[in-house]
Amino acid sequence: MTTLVWFRNDLRVRDHRALAQAQDQGDAVAVYIHEDDAKPLGGASRWWLHHSLHAHAKRLADLGIPFLVEQGDPLEIIPALAARLGANAVTWQRRYDAPGIEVDTQLKAMLPDANIHPTSHPGSLLLEPWEISTSTGGPYRVYSPFAKAAKKLIDDVEPVAEPRPQTGLTILDPSDSINSLGLLPKHRGEPDWSGGLDDEWTPGECGAHDRLTDFLDELELGTDYSEDRDFPARHATSRLSPHFRFGEISPRQAWDACEDSVFRNELLWREFAWHRFHHLPDLATVNVRSEFDHYDWSYNDPAAADSLRNWQNGTTGIPLVDAGMRELRETGYMHNRVRMVVGSFLTKNLGIHWRHGEEWFWDNLVDADLASNAFNWQWVAGSGDDASPFFRIFNPETQANKFDPNGTYIKRWSLDSPRQPEPEPIIDLKESRQAALDAYQAIKG
């Protein structure tokens, strides 16, 4: 029996339930389809996906599993491909965004008419979004009770079978098909994220497990994750987020490997973001708290364009903000503490709508995740579920003094030199903080 395994944001072979089921029944043939996304990937994510697909192709080839790379509509490609291969089953791991669910639901309805059996499996989250609910049966809106309930439901599970080598199937090199997706810049003048990213990251399943091993070794050597993770100059965070984003390692693998309670809470925060996103599919464009529809944010205000550009380019004259934005542009990543600072500065000090921040991060982060990106921007702006209270406005100077006391992080990403001195601040922190609080009082009535 031949089963077609449809890979999406789960580019791994270990702890992969769909692949395991396919091999239980016979031989697996793998396919990746680059879809016309409702929300096209940003540049940094495209770079990551390009290299992750090449890494995944090698992993599958080593196992004797054919790997096909296509581009277009899965509703057309999957049935035609299954028929051409003589596959009588198609299987995949679930996704939880509304457009993806719609496609998968349609495919499940149409494949049986062609005598092709479709199945789907969990694997991207610790819990399915519908498996956890409040006492009244609704979704959670606050993290703490969600996390408490989730921990009770995350039981020990039977490990997924390791993939087995297959023999006798023709293995073709999909490199040309991957390259033809055009994920990397093709024309001079297009933004090229590859320079700093090449030095910083190793996309793929092997890179993910190497990073997890390094993180566990750091904990063994005495890294205090609960404290050190807040200091951007220290190498204390897991840096697994882009690997989770593309499914090169599952959250279950990380959960089982690391028993640190604070790290597990970080995994649950990601879980909570997906729980909310599943129930609020417009999270990236619509304020959760409707009163913020009336907040005096600048969105299309031409007067805010220069401030937004300064923020994007790391030229606000606020050292910690500028350092974070430069780290982002150079590496496709930003330390989480600094993400909160730059997000608060954009939405509250500059008064610019959080959607501008969400869009910029989406294009520049290698870990740009549909749920987490939108959820965290609404959190920092104060417009989301379980949001940071609006009056909690991160002071970049106070944050720098506390979490970068020697200026190590700021100096690393500073452009300050005799030829290019650090710019003067574009805004007064104290005055802009008060303006934000006044604007908030206006919508509170």
Image (cartoon, helix red, strand yellow):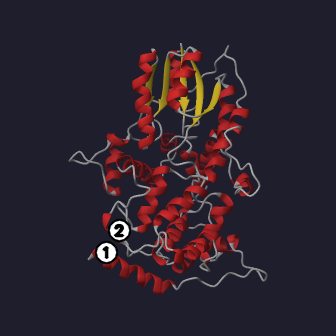
Q: Is residue 269 above or below residue 335?
A: above
The x, y position of residue 321, in whole percent, is 58, 73
Count residues near mark 1 (Cα–Cα under 10 Å), then give few for <14, some for 14-19, many for 20+: few
Residue at 33 percent across and 44 percent down: it is 152
Residue 435 placement: quadrant: bottom left
Residue at 67 percent across and 42 percent down: it is 50
Circle 2 SS class = helix
Identified by mark 1, the residue type is: Ile
Q: Are marks 2 and 1 in contact (CB under 8 Å)?
A: yes
The x, y position of residue 304, in whole percent, is 53, 75
Quadrant where the C terminus is found in the figure: bottom left
Which is more N-terminal, label 1 or label 2? Answer: 2
Residue extending farthest left:
136
The x, y position of residue 117, in whole percent, is 44, 19
Which residue position holds label 1?
443
Whether residue 208 sits left or right of residue 433 in the image: it is: right
Q: Is residue 313 above or below residue 12?
A: below
Residue at 59 percent across and 54 percent down: it is 239
Residue 128 is marked as none
Residue 292 is marked as 2
Residue extending farthest right:
419
Count residues near mark 2 (Cα–Cα under 10 Å), then give few for <14, some for 14-19, many for 20+: some
Identified by mark 2, the residue type is: Phe
Q: Which residue occupies the foreground of this view, 413 or 90?
A: 90
